[in-house]
Amino acid sequence: MKRTLFFLAVFAVGFGGNLTAAPKEGAKPKSPAAHTVTFLAASIRPSLVKITQIGREGTDGIGSGFIVSEDGLIATNLHVIGEARRLQIEMYDGKTYDVTAVQASDSHHDLALLKIDAKGLKPLPLGDSSKVQQGDPIIAMGAPEGLGFSIVQGVLSATRDVDGLEMLQVAVPIEKGNSGGPLLDMQGNVLGLLTLKSLKTDNLGFAMPVNDLKTLIEKPNPVPMSRWLTIGALNPKQWQTHLGAQWTQHAGVIRSEFPGAGFGGRALCLSTQKVPEGTFEIAVTVRLDDESGAAGLTFCSDGGDKHYGFYASGGKLRLTRFDGPDVYSWTILADVPSDAYKPGEWNSLRVRVEPERIVCFVNGQQVIESDDTGLRAGSAGLCKFRTTVAQFRNFRIGTDLAEKPLQPELASQLRSKVEEYIAAAATADKTLDGLLENPAAARRVLVEQRHKLEEEATKLRELEHELHRRAMTKEILAELAKPEPEINLLRCALLLARHDNPEIDIATYMNSFKAMVLDLKDDPEISKGTITAVKRINRYLFEENGFHGSRGDYSSRSNSYLNEVIDDREGLPITLSVLYVELASALGVQGVFGVPLPGKFMVGYRDGPEGELQLVDVFEHGKLVTVEQAALDLTEDGHFPEGALSPTTKQAILLRMLRNLMSSVFDASRSLRESLPYLNLVLAIDPQSAAERLTRAQMRQRLGEKTGAREDVSWLIDNFPTDGPPELMQQLDRWLQSLRD
């Protein structure tokens, strides 16, 4: 989660204890007495746990958590447990347990619940964070470096919105290692989990309300550790890591953190892709969170200590030949600054390796040329040094990876069209002739010209965005134009997400889906028939992989983006249904389809053409329900309208997803211009939709786009039903006339 003014403290701590005795039977209820800080400090000690991440090279990280149930549930922050790592819990008395499952996780709130096989544990009582008041006394507890115990007293300052999340602001000195520790009232009830520390002062921090943790307890999405170890892990068929560090992959981006085992924290991640003989090129786009570190490309590697590296380091570009494990066997061939490199941003690195020279580029500009020939052949991949966190995407190997220039004639045509667009959008021209004779007037005109250029740059960005959206619309329409059985609904849904975010790598998610298919392809239950296959898919998605319905902001656009649903394993009924139906189709399971019930999309299945219709509620962990049960839950009279139980088309599913996105925009009171692209896409897919046509006409008019509004109103008039109300037709005529005035 992004935090603009804060950083995550290093690791979590937690404590437990039933601190107050139950009242005697028949006694008059009393307000729980406040305990002293000394009493609380002693009482919670048995509930402390240490969480250790265990990687290939040993311990990858240490954090903390607190016990929330007698039968082995541990609460902590999600960032404490990471991904694809074994987890070990150490109790206060020194006993250790392996984590058997991640019982629940929530990336939005940075929360997690872990499960261990233990009984008779001492949990902390959970309070009600909705009832806290400004100025309430609180205590914060932490265990820096694992089990070292600390406690501090303060007050609740306020509840604040932090990046869209309601959090508890506390006035206490937060120590390193407090993140995830419990924030308690003076009766010993947990009010929240400490999560953020202010950069401005040590006496200001934030805690995630404990009621968000209760939601995870009530609606878990358990993932066995055997499956958790595969989440975010690099595919060993594609990558081999060397010299440690932690390498993970998420949404097509490879992330490396923690120092490697090599000198200077060096670590390598080598591609298994074969490097062409003779001349070849490699390229990647990389971003560093700390420019004092280094990260980039490695090539001509023997899989150990010998290789080249071309990487960003200290804001410069460096080419180094590594001939051994220590600094004395390294040769820095070049270390140069470049204006083409953008610190803190994504930068494209490319290396061309020829028999007699090496040429290095950053963002298309040549920065280094070396005649060093000390190493040739070998593997290529990624490298990272020191403690910086580096992200990599779009790694490629080939013979010529340079961006090809546009054909001169095409470039001229496109530039001409862009210039026409700018000229048409400009309101006035300013001349600079003679301004040097009057400096005051010259400055005024220059300011005006600068404002004009800024406006033109804004319009160019808008044009770029619109070009991308129309390109995505074209691809979606091409997919939907295929016969229904041939339409790839998964790709359509990903294109819909990419319509909003050009950075989405569709191929990455298609490959993730293929991996899911391969997991089940040879499973004997899949081939036994629809009912058995449906039960197996249910276990795979909801028990083994933790897919679940959204617990928090139901209207969040993330729930409608299939890429984020795959990443976070959380979504709406319709997005989870798309994944389910497409998985069944790819596995050859017959009779599984989407059912557009009013109020909730579900998956339907029949065991044979004449089989009874059954439903899968994907929002509730794949719960199997009858039609009668669903009707009682979703309708007032216990009956579905005609057609509600029929299999829907892939186009109808995509339109329903689009309308969900539109609802999220309208609910968030975003700008009209942000809503308009969704209406444009709906009408491109379904030109006969009068409701969206009317809405777009109104929006266009409010935005001052009279020509577009006239087009939509004219369409409404031309397609007005013959039996429609005459007074409505008259209103449309008057509206069209007003748009012509």
Image: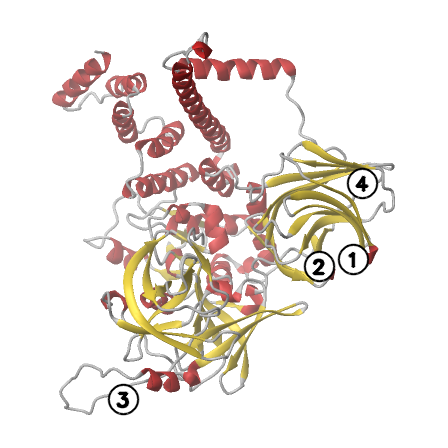
Q: Is residue 76 left or right of residue 262?
A: left
According to the image, label 1 marks what residue? 327
Say which element carries label 2: helix
- Which of the image's four quarters has the C terminus? top left
Q: Is residue 382 visible?
A: yes
- Mark 3 and mark 4 lie on one chain; the one further toward the N terminus is 3
Amino acid type assigned to the residue bearing label 4 in the image = Pro
Q: Which residue lies furthest to the top in this view?
A: 434
At label 1, counting other C-alpha atoms closer than 10 Å, the crowd grade (few under 14, some 14-19, many 20 or more) is few
Q: Distance between the residues labelled 2 and 4?
A: 30 Å
Kindly identify the residue that appears in the image at 58 percent across and 39 percent down. 342
Front one among 566 and 377: 377
Kindly identify the residue that appears in the image at 42 percent across and 62 percent down. 197
- Mark 2 and mark 4 lie on one chain; the one further toward the N terminus is 2
Which of the two marks, 1 or 3, is nearer to us in this view? 1
Q: In this view, does 293 lie to the left or right of 710?
A: right
Amino acid type assigned to the residue bearing label 3 in the image = Ala
**Marker disc for residue 276:** 4
Front one among 726 and 118: 118
Say which element carries label 1: helix
According to the image, label 2 marks what residue? 264
What x and y, as percent, mark residue 209? Answer: 33, 65
Amino acid type assigned to the residue bearing label 2 in the image = Gly
Say which element carries label 4: loop
Callouts 2 and 1 close, C-beta under 8 Å: yes
**Marker disc for residue 21:** 3
